[in-house]
Image (cartoon, rainbow, N blue to C red):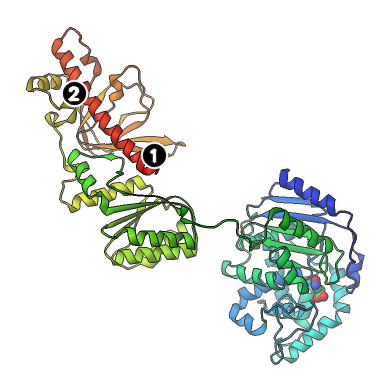
Amino acid sequence: MEAVVRTTSFQHYLDQLYARFLDVRDGDVANYIPELAHVDADAFGMALVTVDGHVYQAGDSRTPFSIQSISKAFTYGIALEDQGPARVAEKIDVEPSGEAFNSISLEPKTGRPRNPMINAGAIVATSLVNGEDAAARLERILAKFEHYAGRPLGINPAIYESERSTGHRNRAIAHLLRNYEILEGDPEEPLDAYFRQCAIEVTARDLALMGATLANDGVNPITAVRALPSPLVPNVLAVMATCGMYDYSGNWIFQVGMPAKSGVGGGVVAVLPGQFGLAVYSPRLDAKGNSVRGIAVCESVSRDFGMHMLRVTRTTTHSVVRNTYTLADVHSNLQRDRDSALALREHGHRALVLELTGELMFVAAEVISSTVADAMSGRDWLILDLARVMAVDNPGGALLTALMDELIDAGKIVVIAGSDGHFAFRQAVRVHFNGRDAAPVFDYADVDRALEYVEDRILESIGLPSHEQRQVHLDEQPLCKGLAADELDLFRSLLDEQSFRPGQVICAEGEAADFVYLLRHGRVRVSLTLDNKHNHRLGAYTAGWVFGESALFSDHNRSADIIADTNVSLYRLDPARLEQPKDARIAALKAKLFANLAELSLDRLVRANHEIRVLTK
Ligand code: GLN
C-alpha cells in the first residue's frame, strides 16, 4: 500500500524550503572513506512522513545513499530487543560523550563505550544482535531495517569495500573493545557487520519513514508492521536526543528539539514523537560531520512550526470535566410512572454523573480524582460518561483505576458509560479488578442506558415495584384524568386493544401517523436508525404513557421507529373516531382528552427545559 504524495500547503512549504537552500554549497563530502568522495556533492532531497503515513517529499528524495551512522540508532534498538536493556547497559552506557563520533570514548576501568551513537558503542551494539555468526546478524539487521523502511534494502558493495579496506581507526577501536572484553570472540566479525550495516542504501523518503516509525511508537505507519517493541521506542529516541548529532547534540536539541541521527553519507533523520519523521539528504558536511543543509532544513521546520519537542502547546486543565449532575436533575430517556419519577427526584442525588471530555492524561485524571473525592460524600453511585473522551493514556488510566478502587472499597458503585473506543483502558481496569467481589460496571455503550440501570437500582433499593410489573388500566391512564364513568365507557368503546411481542415494530419511521397509543403494560422504545446501522434510542415509555399523539394532528409521518422492548399491551385510538361533530358527548370527551394531552406535554416540556439547563450549564 503506497501512500499518496500530496499537493497541499505543507508540500508548498517543503518546495519553498528546497528552493531556499538549493544553492547552499557550504561544507565538503566525507572523504576518509574514499568511495564517499564520489557521490554527487550537490544532491539535495528531503521527505517528511507523518504517523498517518502521509508522505511529502522534495528534490532528490529518492536518490540512494549509504545510511552510515544513522544505522546506529536502529541497530541499538535491535540489541535492546534481543538482549534486554539491562544486559545491553552492561556493555554500552547512555552518557553523551561530547566528543567526535570516532572518538575512543570508553569508561576508564571497564572500557564500556559512552553511548551507542559513537562508533565504539555501535560496534558493540552490532555484536549484540542475535545471530549465529556475522552473516546471520547482518541478515537480521537488514530485515529489521526493512520493517522500518517498508521495502527491501541492499548494501552498496563499493562503499563497504572502501571502508573495510581503510577503516583502521574503527579496527583499532574494535580490538581495544576486545581487550576490555566488551567484545567477545573475534573482533573482526562485528566490525565487518558494522561496516556492512553502514553501507546499507536508503533514500530520504526511506529515512523519513524509518523516523515516522519511531514517531509512531515503533509501528511503520504505511505497512502497519511493528519494527520495534513499544517500550523500547523511548530508549532509542533518548539516545538520539542526547547523542544523535555527535558533538553537536547539545546545540541540536537546544535549537531543533527533536531526537535525530546523522551519518557521514549526508543523511539526517529527525523524529517528532507522535507526529512525524523528517529526513534530509545533502552530502556536504560541516566540521562535526553533520549535513549542512540537513541541519538548516530541520532548524527551519522546527522554527517555522514551533515544533521543539519540549515546547508544550497543549496543557490539560479542569476542562476535562464537561459537566456534573445528579439523577435528581437528569433522568434517563426511559419515561417511568409518576411514583417512580417522584422517587427518583427525591433519591436521585445519590447518583453523581461526571461527563468527561478531551484527553484523560495524568493531570486530567488528577482533576477528576480530586473533584470526585469531595463530591461523592453522601452518594452511592458514580457514573463516568466517557462518550466524549478522545483518549485515555496509561498514567491517566492508572489514576482513574485507583480512584475506582478507593470508591469501591468505600462501598460505592462505579458505572462507566461510553468507553467502547477505549479498549486498552477497559482491559487494564478489567485486569486490575480480576477476581475481586466488586468491580466497576462497564456494560453501557451510552450514558442513557447507564442512567436507566442506576435508576432501576435506586428504585429497587427503596422497594418500588419495577415498571415491568405494572399494569395501567384505562381508568388510571393519565390521559383519562378527570373523565366521568360514562365518559370512560364511551372512550373505551372507541378503542381497540393490541398486544406485541418483544422486538415487534409498532410504528415504522416514514409511515403515516394514523393511531395514538396508550401503553397499558410493558415498555416500548423510540429509536432511530443512523448510518444504516446504529439503533439510537431517543426514548422509551413504560405503562401509563401516551405515544404516537402526532396522529391527532393532520398529515404527520412517523419520525422514528417505535418497537416493543417487552411483551406489550396497548389501547389504540383511531383519531377519526373522535371526529363526530354532531355527537355532543364525543365532542366533550375530545375536549377533555386534548386538555389532558396538553397538560402532559407541558409537564414533559418543563422537565426537558430543566434538563437542558442542567446539561448545558
Ligand atoms: N561508517 C562510518 C564510520 O564508522 C560511519 C560514521 C558516521 O556516519 N558518522 O566512520
Give the mark nearer the N terminus: 2 vs 1.
2
Q: Residues within 10 Å of mark 2 (few under 14, many from 20)?
A: few
Residue 535 image label: 1
Q: Which residue is mark 2?
A: 496
Residue 173 in percent (x, y) is at 79, 84
Q: Quadrant of ligand 1?
A: bottom right
**Type of the residue with mark 1:** Asn
Q: Secondary structure at mark 2?
A: strand
Query: Which residue: 47% across, 52% down?
Result: 319
Q: Nearer the viewer, residue 120 or 532?
A: 120
**Camera sees residue 121:** yes
Residue at the farthest top position: 582
Q: Nearer the viewer, residue 591 or 76?
A: 591
Q: Residues within 10 Å of mark 1 (few under 14, many from 20)?
A: few
The answer to whether 273 is drawn above or below residue 111 in the figure is above
Q: Nearer the viewer, residue 511 or 283?
A: 283
Label 1 near ligand 1 (CB < 8 Å)? no
Which quarter of the rendered picture does the C terminus lie within?
top left
The quarter of the displayed image where residue 431 is located: bottom left
Left or right of 131? Residue 570 is left
Residue 233 in percent (x, y) is at 61, 67
The answer to whether 489 is drawn above or below residue 606 in the figure is above
**Type of the residue with mark 2:** Asp
